[in-house]
Image (cartoon, rainbow, N blue to C red):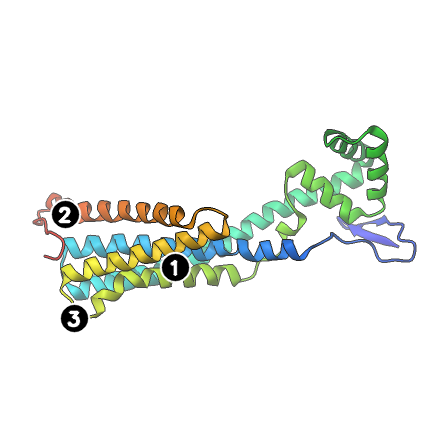
């Protein structure tokens, strides 16, 4: 039989079997699912920090509940849409770049088979195989073009063929949804009949708790100390809060508006 590569047919000796495909394992599939937490962590953290900074600055410069709620809600909506679209387009662009590298390697394997054979042998020699062992391995790979392409792309570009797969809207919805949930926390206290000063600090407390939880969860998945990771992310959040407070306190004076302390 033959396998189509770059719109051309490449003969494959299958001995009555289907051409071999890239091997996969439950462990790799589980890791891919765990790596998907990136969108959730990134979206929630960005939603919390962005909206916390905005509502803190607004509540300090213009202590009006309606203004704060409108500004915070708009930040949540626009930010969620922007993050979702950005995740989709960014992922799509990344996959296109990876696919272009794969296509380039496919063309070389067809147009320059001897050079690619020698190159692959050299890669195996660098891994510690003898000349005879490396040649034997690459000759076997020649009979399975898909796996050979997988090996060449991995050795030459450091990528996996499956990085060009996937896509869809799952990551975009995860990013947008997590951003919206995170962004809602600093705004939530202003919905209740609390003083603006109390709402600021309650929102800050919710943000700190959520940031610590996100950091601890990410640290657990990454094999790091969850408490250290949680405090690391909280420290960044504290920095954003401090900058936002200072901006609301001192920037209004540049426009003739009297500075307002937190809570009025």
Q: Residue at x 22, y 69 (%)?
A: 191
Q: Which mark is residue 258?
A: none
- The residue indicated by pointer 1 is 179
Lower sequence index among marks 3 and 1: 1
| x, y percent for residue 129 | 78, 31
Q: Which mark is residue 249?
A: 2
- Secondary structure, mark 2, is helix
- Secondary structure, mark 3, is loop
Contact, CB < 8 Å: mark 1 with mark 2? no
How much space separates mark 3 and mark 1, taking CA atoms?
Answer: 25 Å
| x, y percent for residue 101 | 65, 42
Mark 2 Cα-neighbour bin, 10 Å: few <14, some 14–19, many ≥20: many
Looking at the image, residue 90 sits to the left or right of residue 133; the answer is left
Camera-near label (3 vs 2) is 3
Lower sequence index among marks 3 and 2: 3
Mark 1 Cα-neighbour bin, 10 Å: few <14, some 14–19, many ≥20: many
Looking at the picture, does residue 1 appear above or below residue 124? below
Report the number of discs.
3
Q: Residue at x 60, y 49 (%)?
A: 96
- The residue indicated by pointer 3 is 193
- Secondary structure, mark 1, is helix
Lower sequence index among marks 1 and 2: 1
How much space separates mark 1 and mark 2, taking CA atoms?
Answer: 27 Å
Mark 3 Cα-neighbour bin, 10 Å: few <14, some 14–19, many ≥20: few
Q: Residue at x 82, y 48 (%)?
A: 144
Quadrant (top left, top right, bottom left, bottom right) of the N terminus = bottom right
């Amino acid at each position: 039989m033959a396998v189509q590569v770059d719109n051309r047919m490449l003969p494959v000796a299958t001995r009555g079997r289907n051409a071999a495909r890239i091997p996969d394992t439950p462990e790799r599939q589980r890791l891919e699912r765990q790596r998907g937490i990136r969108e959730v962590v990134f979206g929630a953290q960005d939603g919390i920090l962005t909206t916390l900074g905005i509502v803190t600055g607004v509540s300090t410069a213009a202590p009006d509940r309606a203004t704060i709620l409108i500004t915070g809600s708009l930040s949540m909506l626009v930010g969620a849409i922007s993050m979702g679209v950005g995740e989709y387009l960014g992922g799509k662009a990344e996959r296109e770049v990876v696919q272009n590298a794969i296509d380039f390697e496919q063309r070389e394997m067809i147009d320059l088979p001897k050079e690619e054979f020698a190159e692959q042998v050299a890669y195996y020699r660098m891994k510690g195989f003898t000349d005879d062992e490396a040649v034997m391995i690459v000759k076997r790979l020649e009979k399975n073009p898909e796996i050979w392409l997988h090996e060449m792309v991995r050795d030459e570009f450091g990528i996996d063929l499956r990085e060009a797969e996937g896509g869809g809207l799952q990551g975009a919805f995860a990013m947008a949804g997590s951003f919206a949930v995170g962004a809602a926390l600093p705004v939530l206290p202003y919905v209740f009949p609390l003083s603006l000063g109390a709402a600021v600090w309650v929102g800050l407390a919710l943000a700190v708790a959520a940031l610590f939880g996100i950091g601890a969860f990410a640290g657990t998945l990454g094999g790091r100390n969850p408490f250290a990771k949680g405090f690391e992310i909280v420290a960044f959040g504290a920095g954003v809060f401090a900058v936002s407070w200072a901006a609301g306190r001192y920037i209004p004076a540049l426009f003739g508006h009297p500075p307002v302390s937190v809570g009025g």
